[in-house]
Structures are given as structure tokens and as C-alpha cells.
Image (cartoon, helix red, strand yellow):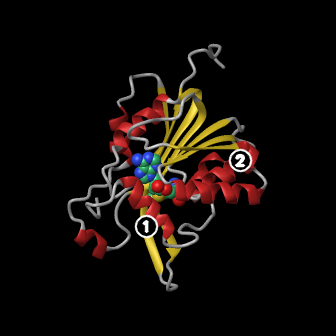
Amino acid sequence: MTDEKLSEEEFWDARYGESERIWSGKPNAVLVDEISGLEPGSALDLGCGEGGDAIWLARQGWRVTAVDISRVALDRATRHAAEAGVADRIDWQRHDLGASFPEGSFDLVSACFLHSPGDMPREKILRAAAAAVAPGGILLIAGHAGFPSKEQHDRHPDVHFPTAQEVLESLGFPDGQWEVQRSEEHERTRTGPDGQSITHVDNVLRVRRLDDRAEPGA
Ligand SMILES: C[S@@+](CC[C@H](N)C(=O)[O-])C[C@H]1O[C@@H](n2cnc3c(N)ncnc32)[C@H](O)[C@@H]1O
């Protein structure tokens, strides 16, 4: 933990309590790029924060279950969804995903930037995420491939961000049951609070659970 006195829940509640909005409110570009145009169905958004991704998915017609450890974030996300007119399409659930996981299976399971400075068992959560994908459904995992600046890296030299390939291997998929649709790193540039340009390197893994109920040749 960054502060030994805080649990992970307390850390994130405090982080979200610092200001009225800590993320942009927009969906992650990687989600928009990867999911636009798919037939909407049921979606699970893990570590949904203030709800930017969940609200975008709901606007595209998805029925969304959105999960976060922070009640502060979920309350804020609930308000934003009401303002966006999609409150009835999103089921907000509070879970510490290392300890409990939403029930059901989903046509899309998305974990975008599910990172935490705490002891969050990310690999375990991502394996549970894969198990929650319905036959024919998509698992999308986007994450940081490193710190955005050398200074931060120097302060945390022991932190390892897995590559997309390492994330894929950690999922332990049996042969022949999943199709890898994307596994790559890419650069993203954003404007920081002082107008400076900040470059991030992200990785994205998109896999599809094969549907063994499908007709041969379908
Ligand atoms: C880096 S933020 C990303 C938020 C959002 N997905 C986005 O891309 O803007 C990570 C999110 O994961 C949540 N989180 C951290 N640990 C968690 C846990 N154990 N269970 C559920 N959510 C968790 C945090 O509260 C936070 O909202």
C-alpha cells in the first residue's frame, strides 16, 4: 500500500474524495476502438471508477454490470448515469474483486486500467474475468505497460507492468478454446493538467471465447 494505515477501499475512497472528478468522464479510447460496432449484449466493467466506460457501453445499447471497490466512485458514477439517461441499463455493484465477484456470464468483460497501488490480486481477478465470459463473448484487458514518465519509474523501480503476452499467459487458457484477436502495445498521448504532452505506453489484449455450441462452419 502507499499508506500502510489505509485499506485498498479506504485508499480509493480517499482518492475519489480528493475532487469532484478525477477521470475525464470519457470512455477509454481503447474500449471505443475495440468494441464499437459489436452487437450489444450483456457487459461487465471491472474497476469502473466514475463510470465513463459503463455509461458509453449503455449508450451503445449494452446492459452493463459495473463494479468498483469504492463506494464514493460508484455513487458518483450512478449520478452521471442518471444525468446521461442510462440509469436503467447499468447495475452498479460494489465488490473487492479479490474477495468477491459478480454472478453470471457476459458477452463482454472489460478490465480497462484495473491497476491499484494496493495488494489487488490482478491475475486472480483477470482469471475470474475470463471465466465470466459467455461462449462467443469477448474479454478486453487494457493496462499500462509502464509509468508515463522516467521520474515515476525511478521512484518505483520494483513495479513490473506485464506485457499483453504476459497477461495472456497468466490467464492459462486451455488450447483451442480462445481466439486471440489482439495482443499488442501502443502509445497514447494526452494533455496533462499544465498543458504538457504526456505519453503513455499501454497494452491491450482482446480475446474471444470460442463457442462450441456454434454450428460447424458458422
Ligand atoms: C486506475 S483506476 C481505472 C478506472 C477506470 N477503469 C478507468 O479506466 O478510468 C482503477 C479502478 O479500480 C478500482 N479498484 C481498485 N482495486 C479494486 C478491487 N480490489 N476491486 C474492485 N475495484 C478495484 C479503483 O477504485 C479504481 O476505480
Q: Check disc 2 and give the amino acid type.
A: Ala
Quadrant (top left, top right, bottom left, bottom right) of the N terminus: bottom left
* Residue for point 39% across, 22% down: 175
Badge 1 crowding class, 10 Å Cα cut-off, few under 14, some 14 to 19, many 20 or more, is some
List x then y, in percent, for residue 169: 33, 36
Q: Check disc 1 and give the amino acid type.
A: His
Quadrant (top left, top right, bottom left, bottom right) of the C terminus: top right
Vertical relation: 16 (above or below) 113: below
* Residue for point 69% across, 35% down: 41
Identify residue for label 2: 58
- For this rendering, which residue is in front, 168 or 4? 4
Residue 204 visible within the image: no
Q: Is residue 216 left or right of residue 182?
A: right
Q: How far apart are the two marked residues, 2 and 1, measured between alpha carbons? A: 27 Å
Give the quadrant of residue 210.
top right
Q: Secondary structure at mark 1?
A: strand
- Label for residue 200? 1
